[in-house]
Image: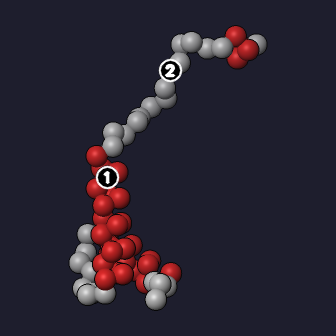
Amino acid sequence: MPLSSYRMHKIYIAATMKYGLGSDDLEELAYYYKIRKEMDDMKKQPIKKGIPLNWDTPERMDK
């Protein structure tokens, strides 16, 4: 049986707050670990800050 949106939201909150799930349901655990993995992957990616400067401005943009 697929997870309800309410249960998915509860699992998402638990995963983002780094709380334990407290469930043995395989479907809920799979969703919990999927969210945790996505969060860990996001931490590994560099954060782009500021405004990128592009000195090679096309001529049509100058007008």
Q: Earlier in the sequence, mark 1 or mark 2?
A: 1
Numbered label attached to residue 54? none
Residue depicted at x 49% and y 26% = 52
Q: Quadrant of residue 33?
A: bottom left
Residue 44 appearing in the image: yes
Q: Position of residue 51 (x, y in %)?
A: 49, 29
Which residue corresponds to mark 1? 41
Secondary structure type for disc 1: helix
Q: Nearer the viewer, mark 1 or mark 2?
A: 1
Residue 16 appearing in the image: no
Q: How many numbered badges does the structure rendering display?
A: 2
Query: Contact, CB < 8 Å: mark 1 with mark 2?
Result: no
Pick the residue in front: 25 or 48: 25
Q: Quadrant of residue 56?
A: top right
Residue depicted at x 44% and y 31% = 50
Q: The residue under label 2 is which amino acid type?
A: Leu
Which residue corresponds to mark 2? 53
Residue depicted at x 33% and y 58% = 39
Q: Is residue 38 above or below residue 47?
A: below
Q: Is residue 47 above or below residue 20?
A: above
Q: Position of residue 45 (x, y in %)?
A: 33, 43
